[in-house]
Amino acid sequence: MLPEYIARDTARTGRQQAGVFSGVFATGEVLGLALGSFAYGLVLQAFGYVSSDTGHAAAQSAGAELGVLLGVTLFPALATAGLLFLHLRRRTASAADAASGDVSPVVM
């Protein structure tokens, strides 16, 4: 998607700003990785996960086990569902561009 947005912006503005878009994308990616780990930690805390001591596994409650299960299955699925909105926005933007006659080249 990034090359498509760069090409569309270049066609629209006449300026090449690939570095800016790449920097914003990289920042968003790193922020997403950090926030994902933080959010997973909050899920574990909310379900009562107990960290283990060195060399000894801590006994986990059924709620903590459920939290681990949801944290590695449902939580990523919900986070990924946000990509659906990007896809819908992309289709809407493409339809609007086609209607206005402003169709920019797609570079892959």
Image: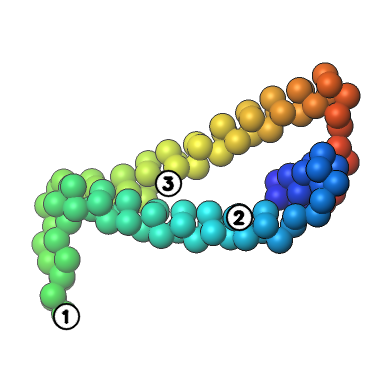
- Type of amino acid under label 2: Phe
Front-most of residues 14 and 54: 14
CB contact under 8 Å: marks 2 and 1: no
Residue named by callout 2: 25
Front-most of residues 41 and 69: 41
Disc 3 element: helix
On the rendered structure, is 20 left or right of 13?
left
Task: Give the quarter of the image for residue 34.
Answer: bottom left
Q: Position of residue 46 (x, y in %)?
A: 18, 47
Q: CA distance from mark 2 to mark 1?
A: 40 Å
Residue 76: numbered disc: 3
Disc 1 element: loop
Q: Which is closer to the viewer, label 2 or label 3?
A: 2
Q: Residue at x 42, y 38 (%)?
A: 78
Q: CA distance from mark 2 to mark 3?
A: 20 Å
Task: Give the quarter of the image for residue 36.
Answer: bottom left
- Type of amino acid under label 3: Pro
